[in-house]
Amino acid sequence: MHTYISILRGINVSGRNMIKMEALRSMYEALDFKDVKTYIQSGNVVFRTKKTSNHKLEKKIAEKITEIFSYDVPVMVKELDEIADVLENNPFVNKRKEDITKLHVTFLSHEPEHSFLDKIKDLKYASDEFILFGKNVYLFCPDGYGNTKLSNNFFESKLKVTATTRNWKTINELMVLGKSVAE
């Protein structure tokens, strides 16, 4: 059995796409996933299943959400080592020692084309900063994520990808939860 973390975009936000975590856990169990655990109400699910591609799992989960809840929800699936890499490679933590309460990571569905990135990389976004590392965008938002222009919609429209963001605490908690499920 292999441990995965799925990150859903846009559920339980502003009263839209409401899914109770108990119902979500039941849905994952109906997919024959084991040791299903959720973290907070925003669609973070840790589970175990046989080793398969992240893309196949993303498709399987998204289709089941549409079938059961009638929502079209983007799903990103990560393996524990991918989350460990995210934690290990954050330049705002490792090089600059920024306040971790101001840090977020935007997960992208795929690496964006360089031409799209070139159009936004040198622009200024008030005091907010971002650094792209593969399929992850590290964000430093000193005035809070709720006030940044560097939102999921920004990255989706500029980079032509699907994006979902989690704060630094959530990513750390998902790693802890993932490790406990893997044991």
Image: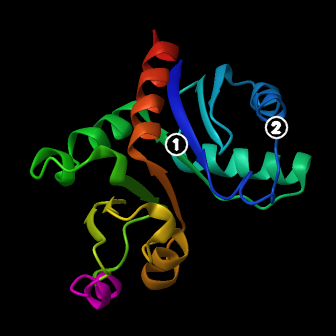
With respect to residue 141, does 68 lie above or below? above
Looking at the rendering, the stretch of residues picked out in magenta corresponds to 115-124
Q: Residue furthest left?
A: 95
Specify the amino acid type for callout 2. Answer: Lys
Along the viewing direction, whichever of 53 and 70 lies nearer the viewer: 70
Which residue sits at x=23%, y=49%?
A: 90
Magenta portion: prevailing SS class = helix
Specify the amino acid type for callout 1. Answer: Ser
With respect to residue 4, does 116 lie above or below? below
Give the mark toward the camera: 2 or 1: 2
Residue 86 - label? none
Quarter of the image with the N terminus is top right
Image quadrant of residue 133? bottom left
Q: Crowdedness of circle 1 by 10 Å Cα count: few (<14), some, many (20+)?
A: few
For this view, does 148 lie left or right of residue 5?
left
Rounded to the nearest angstrom, the CA distance separating label 2 from label 1 is 27 Å
Whether 120 is among the magenta residues is yes
Q: Residue furthest top?
A: 183
Q: How far from the left and from the top, in percent, is residue 142?
A: 31, 62
Which residue sits at x=78%, y=52%?
A: 63
Which residue sits at x=50%, y=25%?
A: 3
Where is mark 2, residue-wise?
A: 20
Where is mark 1, residue-wise?
A: 53
